[in-house]
Amino acid sequence: MTDTAEYITLLVISVAITIAVGRVLSTSGEPFLQEVFEDEKVTKSVNRLLEVLFYLITIGVLTIISVWTVDVGSQLQNMAVKIGIVLIVLGIAYGISMLVLIRVRQQRRADQISEEVQLKLADGGVNTHPVAQPAHPVHPVAPPNGL
């Protein structure tokens, strides 16, 4: 196999796997985003933007990997090593994407719980906005003698 054929084969396999992973991420991530944004139009828009970002970053890295020289034996072994690197990069990108979605969802849930607690406390007559206390207590100053 020529270098050009190896290069094209690696890119085709890598891009196909990237698109498959991107689709799974997009499909599986949409319910997380729906929970966060609560607006279907915004959810679909953000999901599409994240999908494009995933593709741009991942395919860019894969393109760089495709031109690296790897020499572990035969061309087939070299291709297998490069595909392995591609899979690891995709796994890392996928994992980071999932962590971000989970973090956003957790933050949204924490905000919702905080809002619910404040509403319940306010309904019970409890002031949920404490009066700010100065950092240092203010002591009255006595005027000097004769004033």
Image: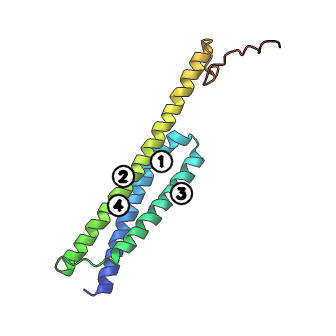
* CA distance for labels 3 and 2: 18 Å
Q: Which residue is mark 3?
A: 49
**Residue 90 percent coordinates (x, y):** 35, 61
Q: Which residue is mark 2?
A: 95
- Displayed quadrant of residue 120: top right
Give the mark toward the camera: 1 or 3.
3
Q: Determine the residue positioned at 31% across, 84% down.
A: 5
- Tag 3: residue type? Leu
* CA distance for labels 4 and 1: 19 Å
* Callout 4–callout 3 Cβ contact below 8 Å: no
Element on which disc 2 rests:
helix
Of labels 1 and 3, earlier in sequence is 1
Give the mark toward the camera: 4 or 1.
4
Near-viewer residue (50 or 137) = 137
Of labels 3 and 2, earlier in sequence is 3
* CA distance for labels 4 and 3: 18 Å
- Displayed quadrant of residue 3: bottom left
Element on which disc 1 rests:
helix
Give the mark toward the camera: 3 or 2.
2
Q: Residues within 10 Å of mark 4 (few under 14, many from 20)?
A: many
Q: Which residue is mark 4?
A: 90
- Tag 2: residue type? Gly
**Residue 17 percent coordinates (x, y):** 34, 65
Element on which disc 3 rests:
helix
Of labels 4 and 1, earlier in sequence is 1
Specify whether 26 is left or right of 124.
left
Of labels 2 and 4, earlier in sequence is 4
**Residue 13 percent coordinates (x, y):** 32, 71
**Residue 68 percent coordinates (x, y):** 32, 77
* CA distance for labels 2 and 1: 16 Å
Return the residue found at the far front.
146
* CA distance for labels 2 and 4: 8 Å
